[in-house]
Amino acid sequence: MLEVVEAKTTEDLMAEIGQRARAAGRILAIAPADQKNKALAEMAAAVRVATPDILAGNRLDLEAMKAGGQTAAFLDRGTLTEERIEAIAKALEDIVALDDPVGSVIAAWDRPNGLKIERVRTPLGVIGVIYESRPNVTADAGALCLKAGNAVVLRGGSDTINSNRAIHAALQKGLAAAGLPEDAIQIVPVTDRAAVGEMLRGLQGNLDVIVPRGGRSLVERVQTEARVPVFAHLEGLVHIFVDKAADLEKSVEVIVNSKLRRTGICGALETLLVHEDVAHSHLPVIVKALQEKGCEIRGGAIVRDICENIVPASEDDWSTEYLDKILSVKVVADLDAAMEHIARYGSNHTDCILTEDQATADRFQREVDSAIVLHNASTQFADGGEFGMGAEIGIATGRMHARGPVGVEQLTSFKYKVHGTGQTRP
Amino acid sequence: MLEVVEAKTTEDLMAEIGQRARAAGRILAIAPADQKNKALAEMAAAVRVATPDILAGNRLDLEAMKAGGQTAAFLDRGTLTEERIEAIAKALEDIVALDDPVGSVIAAWDRPNGLKIERVRTPLGVIGVIYESRPNVTADAGALCLKAGNAVVLRGGSDTINSNRAIHAALQKGLAAAGLPEDAIQIVPVTDRAAVGEMLRGLQGNLDVIVPRGGRSLVERVQTEARVPVFAHLEGLVHIFVDKAADLEKSVEVIVNSKLRRTGICGALETLLVHEDVAHSHLPVIVKALQEKGCEIRGGAIVRDICENIVPASEDDWSTEYLDKILSVKVVADLDAAMEHIARYGSNHTDCILTEDQATADRFQREVDSAIVLHNASTQFADGGEFGMGAEIGIATGRMHARGPVGVEQLTSFKYKVHGTGQTRP
């Protein structure tokens, strides 16, 4: 394959990848659930068999990363072990167990003239995934797209190209064993940025949607430059509002969990808003619980008056996604002030209200314009698996097509089947 | 308003329109159904009261169009009468009667940890409608967007700017009477193409989707240049396949209706494919019925052998949307050949199979990749009203978000409401 690559421009290479993906997508679109599931199971088996090859590829990548002076956290994300490869295989098997979305009836109704109309799920087409140095995404994204009947073009980080190639070879064995086209899951074999540019331009009409998986700068570039739809979120600037009718004990538990269970995920709490009526009663207890677990609290004059050891907050704090053991805290006059703050600084990802007053919760959940709006539950539930959707390819904050966790159903489109008995239109 | 317009660049003007639309959209998004319905009813009343003003505006437009040498058909589309204005008012009232999509629960489920998850419809945001010289679109599109809680920016054809302004003034009276922001429905007050360019670039992030309504060249420009999602179809290259198990009598009725009920709509039949096993038995009867009603039939050698008065078809005929009393006809070997023809020449809009064999119908409806796939029914049912959706803003052939008739539901997004009792994530 490399010989072919070297003889072509990136533009020609990517155009051909797009054409092959489109052709494979046509076959996948009508492939029965059993055949796709067989491919997924064979892919899991092939990944297990290929463990030595995948580890060998990963060693090459890690040596290059170390030589390049990458950070320990970066190296850890890019490192594969036998255990992590088994987890990749297991994740493929989990996708077998999901319901096949293709062909499922979303809605059905009858017309007075006897026509029966069904709205039925269909695949989206060809999906492009652009991701950074996490080799497991090669298998996860490939499998999720396949389950929904889509062809996929994977462009992973150059740092893990050898790991990705070894995993991809196993996926192709699984496809072949099930009689599905190997072009259903392609990886971009070159690492230049021009290849990404071709994907952002839509592979000459052969790419229907792009999913970026990685840090802010990657997502920002994709959202700015893509000429095709993008399923993504730039950041998760997650708020919790402690209403005047919030239960204190429940609040402490939910807030500590939302902030500290894992600080690096997009559903982690970043800003706490507290109704002034309970600022004195609730805030010191909440702040103390967080500080005891090593969390830094930043706040303005009112917060500093009420609590101890508060770092002064600047205007920037309200728009900072810390992804760390830091929380900004603000006392607000009421529900409206809380919702105004969220509208101004939020990222339409996940926000939460803590209250025992149902009418207040209803208003918050109706009016806050975020993909996920919770009442009395940890913001760390913002996750496709926790929603019961199975695997997800990411969380989207846009309003078009997919919003919230993007699982197999969100990777589908639909069509209308109209069943008649010879009806004509008057 | 014109004074203000003249003092600003089109770019500044359009940016301000976008900002005002976004602000109005935030208010509309949480407006109760009653308030929106009151606005719609008041709009209908205001249109009736404004009939003399609307007719006066329309006279100005018609004089300019006549001076410009426009065709009779173009003039007819742009002409308003008391009857047509009453129809506009009535259409507004019909939209009152539709269910409010905002807040309706699309899906709801419980998690083992007690969380209750709801997927609930929300407005899309700000919708741009770019249309040609049909003044009724000003009211139809404005009202449909309002019903779904969206702000709308309307850019009508310059030929009917005075008619549009008079209708728009009535719509704004209705909004004001219901206490809703007048910026919820704005018309672009200038007629230069640069204004369209600003809309295609998305009004600096304040336009979420564009709906073009008009001829092929308008839709083509919008689809090519828009940097925001577009709900549209370029053409309706509609096929019917007469299977070997097709009932002859039913076929004649459905085909004549599909082709000739109205030839100028996107659901009108353009190409007939006939299984070779029934070409001799069925095709002459079908062709004769069409010819008796003045339809020209174009076909290849086989069709000319079987039928009389056939115009030779060229390769171009298979990709021509006639929108006229002309039909291209081809004899095909089997179902696969028919589906291959549709995949190659079709426009993913509407296609139909005539057969008494359920398994064949199932395969056709599953495998043909069109927004609407019918079995034993006229293709002229490809219409939101006929689907029972109420008014539609158009028919979309893309796979993202909306597909098929675009009614109020398709003008919405969704969010997740998660209801807890203090759950934290382990």
Image (cartoon, coloured by chain):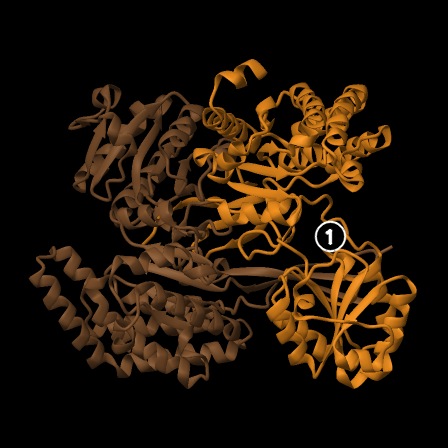
Chain colours: A brown, B orange
Q: Position of residue A301 (x, y in %)?
A: 23, 19
Which amino acid type is marked by label 1? Answer: Asp
Q: Is residue A223 left or right of residue A216?
A: right
Residue B38 in sight from this viewpoint: yes
Q: Which one is in front, A220 or B328? A: B328
Q: Which one is in front, B152 or B415? A: B152
Q: Position of residue B296 (x, y in %)?
A: 83, 65
Secondary element at tag 1: loop
Q: Is residue B235 left or right of residue A353?
A: right
Subunit bearing disc 1: B
Mark 1 lies on residue: B383
Quadrant (top left, top right, bottom left, bottom right) of the N terminus of chain A: bottom left
Q: Quadrant of residue A348?
A: top left
As drawn, A44 above or below A379: below
Q: Position of residue A144 (x, y in %)?
A: 42, 66
| Number of callouts | 1
Q: Quadrant of residue B168?
A: top right
Q: Is residue A254 left or right of residue B45?
A: left
As drawn, B131 above or below A77: above
Q: Which one is in front, A49 or A64? A: A64
Q: Position of residue A338 (x, y in %)?
A: 40, 27
* Label 1 packing within 10 angstroms: few (<14), some (14-19), many (20+): many
At 25% from the left and 76% from the top, the residue drawn is A2
